[in-house]
Image: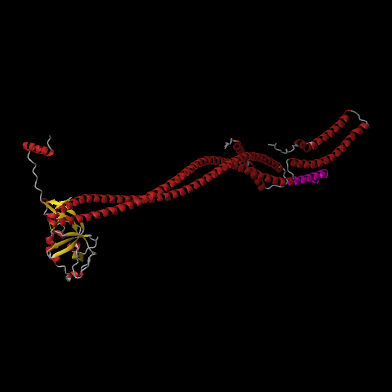
Amino acid sequence: MPPRVRLLPLRGKVMNKVLKTGVPNLWLVVMALGVLGCIAGVVYALSKAQLDAGTLMALIGAPGVLAVALLAYRGQRRRMEYTEAGVAEINRALVKIAEGDLTVQVPEDNSVTRDIAKEINASTQRQRELIRNIKTPFKVSTEEITKIGGIAEGQVEKGRELTRSVVESTTATTEMVRTSEEIKQSTAEAARTSERNRQRVAQGYELTKDMSKASADVRESVQETSKSAKRQGELIQSVTAAAEYIQALNTKISVVAINTRIEAEKAGEHGRPFLGIAEAIGDLMREAEEEGRKIISQVRMLQNLSADNLSSMENTVGTVVTILEYIDRLDSSLEEINAGSSAITKIITSVDDAAGQSATTARHMNNSMDAIRERNLDISEYSESTLVGVSALTASMRDVAESLSQFRIEEITETERTLAAIEDLKNIQGAKKVYREEEMTALETAKIERVSV
Amino acid sequence: MGISAFQSLELLERLHAYDNVPAPEVAPPPVTWVGSSLGIAGVPLLIGAGEMDELIETPSVTTIPGTKPWVLGVAAYKGGLLPIYSGDVLFRKRPYIGRVRDYCMVIRRPGMHFGLTLSHVQRDLRFPIDQRIMEHEVDPDFAEYTLGGFMYKGEFLAVLDIDKLVADEELANAAAGKASSTKGKSNE
């Protein structure tokens, strides 16, 4: 802090004693002692010796001279006292001025010191005006510096907040970078999975093509088999018709045999050979009938089996057709899945690119945040320095104001003295702000954890 | 000079006679029942030999108005007319709508000469007479016209007694009464 400027009052007590006390009385005592000495000398001379005229004249004239001298001295003494009074007034005024009271007014009725008093009064008047002219802008400057100090303090506070915000933003961008890298890894894994799925879908697509081709072959084969089965059924139908015809022929032969037997019995003894023939035909017909019945039964079984096979083949064809429809649907679904997988792959790729760009941007942002934090620290330091300077300047201004306030340029009332005391107390309270700045300095100089991306 | 074959045979016969080997006894032929297996209205029946005159294919008939429903009509048969009766309608006593009967048997009795349609014809069968079963459940519509039967391949074949059938008064009068004039026709 700059040294406190204080105008010390002049101390002129010794001069005051010299000019005011003891000088006239001393002179009077000396003069009285001189007169008494002269008289004593005359009396001694008269009593001891005869005196000549000259000596007598000398003895007589000496008191006169002494009296004249005393009168002259008296006048001179009065003038000196008059002058001393004016000087004393001037001296008191000067003492007041030296104490800073510029409101003092030197009386101008003393003719000796009138000019000096006028000059002193004019000088104090000019000084008052000068001080008044100084105090007004000084007061304004003090208020503005106080405002600047407040602004600098606000800047420091804002700088701290900005530092915290930047640190938080840096942390957030770091987290964003980490999240972006995780997203990138996830998207890479998803892209690989999507690619594998796409390859599997492509394989499935090829398999559906093979299945479709195989199903078409199966359908054609089954259709050919169905045609053969139909032809077989027709043949079995014709065989059945032939068997039934044979069965009908057998019945007719049986009828013939029965009639033969009847006619042979009617013929009596002559018809006996026909009876044997009829019986032989009957025996043959029994075997033929049994075989024919077996044939018809088996042919009907064949017919039923052929019908079942035909129905089964028709069902198979229908199933194959249904399978082909399903394969078509599966093919369409696989194509859609393939297209969807390609779209997903593109989306994942775009997400990966976006995540990479986001990570890059976050890194740039982090670097920018670091730069901002560095600049903010610089700004905080500058603000802090500014605040310190402003505080010092404020203190200096306060000292100057106090020094200037020692110059009384106007009569101060009791209320103004009270307000001045309150103002002094306010200035004393301003020390807390200085302490907070130190605290802020300690906070600002503290180690700041740097987050590396 | 050697012996001839007849002489060898005679010697062999003498040797056997000398050995006193008895000749195998020929069992008497069993008494058999001979008849024809056929069916009427789906019921398998047996017709004894001599009971029917002939089996013929069902001829084309000419319907006779005013007769009972089981009279299909008359057909030309060996230069004469032969009434053809429907076995289905006669025994079941209800109109028949089904497969055309291809055969009918001709029955000739004194005063009765007609043909009766058959549902199927098999052949002549021969059964031992002791295997005839007299007590066996028979289709109710045929029960009063049968006389026992034989089991053949797990199936009971009832013997249709043509005499009972001919003796039936229903068959004796083919003229349609007032009650029967409203009965349905068959497709035969």
Q: Position of residue A276 (x, y in %)?
A: 16, 51
Of residue A133 and residue B133, the one placed in the foreground of this image is B133
Identify the image quadrant of the N terminus of chain A: top right
Q: Position of residue A29 (x, y in %)?
A: 81, 35
- Horizontal arrangement in the rendering, residue A83 relative to residue A181 (left or right): right
**Numbered disc total:** 0
Its colouring scheme is: secondary structure
The residue at 13%/51% (across/down) is B127
| Furthest-top residue in this view | A48
| Furthest-right residue in this view | A53
Q: Position of residue A3 (x, y in %)?
A: 70, 36
- Horizontal arrangement in the rendering, residue B62 relative to residue A182 (left or right): left
Assess whether residue A155 is covered by the magenta stretch: no
Q: Position of residue A119 (x, y in %)?
A: 81, 44
Of residue B33 and residue A390, the one placed in the foreground of this image is B33
Where, by quadrant of the figure, is residue A52 drawn?
Answer: top right
The residue at 68%/46% (across/down) is A144
Q: Is residue A1 above or below residue A143?
A: above
Q: Which residues are magenta?
A: A105-132
Q: Is residue A248 above or below residue A202?
A: below
Of residue A48 and residue A319, the one placed in the foreground of this image is A319
Asked if residue B53 shows in the view, the reply is: yes
Assess whether residue A128 is covered by the magenta stretch: yes
Asked if residue A421 shows in the view, the reply is: no
The overriding secondary structure of the stretch rendered in magenta is: helix
Identify the image quadrant of the C terminus of chain A: top right
| Furthest-bottom residue in this view | B178
